[in-house]
Amino acid sequence: MKLRLVCLWAALTALAAAAESGGAGTPPAGTRPNILFILVDDLGYMDIGANNPQTFYETPNIDALAKKGMRFTAGYAACPVCSPTRASILTGKYPQRTGVTDYIGAAQPEKWKRPTPLLPAPYQERLALDEITLAEAFKAAGYRTFFAGKWHLGPEGFWPEDQGFEINRGGTDRGGPYGGNKYFSPYGNPRLADGPPGEHLPDRLATETARFIEANRERPFFACLSFYSVHTPLMARPDLQKKYEEKRQRLGLEPRWGREGQREVRWVQEHAVYAAMVEAMDQAVGKVLAKLEELGLADRTVVVFTSDNGGLSTSEGHPTSNLPLRAGKGWLYEGGIREPLIVHAPGVTRPGTVCDTPVTSPDFFPTLLELAGLPPRPGQHVDGVSFVPLLRGAELGRGPIFWHYPHYGNQGGAPAGAVREGDWKLIEWYEDGRLELYDLRRDLSEQHDLAAEQPLKVKQMHARLEAWRKSVGARMPALNPQPSSREEAASSRRKQSS
């Protein structure tokens, strides 16, 4: 009897300790790693030196991070535009489950004015408050939570402080730094006090993040540094702009253009203003990483660096080139969805390792929980798969990755869906049902459509894509009731294919 009582007391004590620390199997607060999640807006896969040694841009701090951790060559955004990817990261779900399938602010179908054969699907204009976000999961486990920069997931009442972040520096409904003097103070941002005149926004966001880290050095934290950079407006520090204008002249670089649909697509990285924006962002990353080193926290902090969609190459100044990747932001070709992704997890990742296994935005939620020793939340991150095995150097059967973008973006793309399975990628264009099939191992640039040569593969992958759309409740675009719109669009498509 006495032995049974001792065992019962031990069991109750263990349960109480687990509850206090956030759940069974959860390490005590003092041993949990910090999490620093760095999200850059519109940064293309080929925009960092770690992925592209020939890049025109200079990213020494990001490249150094890659040498310390694991660099992914097939890290994907859940959508080729920003808001859906951001919702996917925070919820562990594909955008179709949250309803946030287009950038918030895009015209809903009832207000659609463009002469297109389809009306875009309706979408949710805010991330629902009943979603359990990454920030809420970490806050419940005793982490301090912090957000700085671009949010773009709904109006006031749906901002970071309403979704689990205790501190919000600059996160509002805006998709870019559109108030005040934009990238320079005064910012005109209701969640970011103005700095001295001329203060640069990327540096300010890094400063706020570094301050938060220092103030919480004694307890675990989840900090999300979500840059407005390198999104439009294209504005740069004068000193850096001058540097890249001189570099462009020294290298003899000139713009070269191709075609993607009806749009021009940039083929050479030589845009001085964009290059300056990339370097300023890299310097801001370096400032935060240096603070971790200064405080002795680098060996206790998981750092994730990624982007929300591909580089902007077919619109709004066409500032970057994603070659050899096809197209860019707004398209389901690789240039629109393949992202820079670097993860440094001390004690888990080996320095300088490279992983070719595809992962995608919903995977961050279960991955970060596992790295922190926190229990999974399978009812929330239903689409995410933890890629911790990859970080440890093991294999992972990730399974297929899906996309559904039932909208017309601002960059020339049309409503489409896609699935990647192994090296094969299928794209379905919703306007006419056209199917394209690519072998990414042999054709990363997606120049050789193999659909006619591989009818069985097309049939299998298309069936998989249709079944997935049904399982997540994906909304589809509808026919545009204006006949002239369909006729004009059909004529345009014929010209493109001829």
Image (cartoon, rainbow, N blue to C red):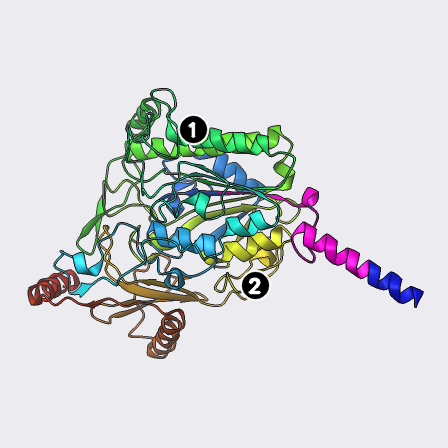
Name the mark on residue 396: 2
Name the mark on residue 390: none
Instruction: Specify start and end residues of the magenta stretch as a single range.
Output: 10-37
Q: Which of the 4 quarters of the picture holds residue 261? A: bottom left
| Residue 84 or residue 126, whichever sits in front | 126
| Residue 439 or residue 318, whichever sits in front | 318
Residue at the left extreme, as displayed: 484
Answer whether residue 324 is visible to the viewer in this image: no
Crowd band around label 1 with a 10 angstrom C-alpha radius: few (<14), some (14–19), many (20+): many
Work out which quarter of the rendered image holds the C terminus and state it.
bottom left
Q: Does residue 36 show up magenta in the picture?
A: yes
Above or below, comparing residue 285 to residue 379 in the picture? above
| Residue 178 or residue 250, whichever sits in front | 178
Residue 286 at x, y = what percent?
Answer: 50, 32
To which residue does mark 1 refer? Answer: 204
Q: Does residue 179 show up magenta in the picture?
A: no
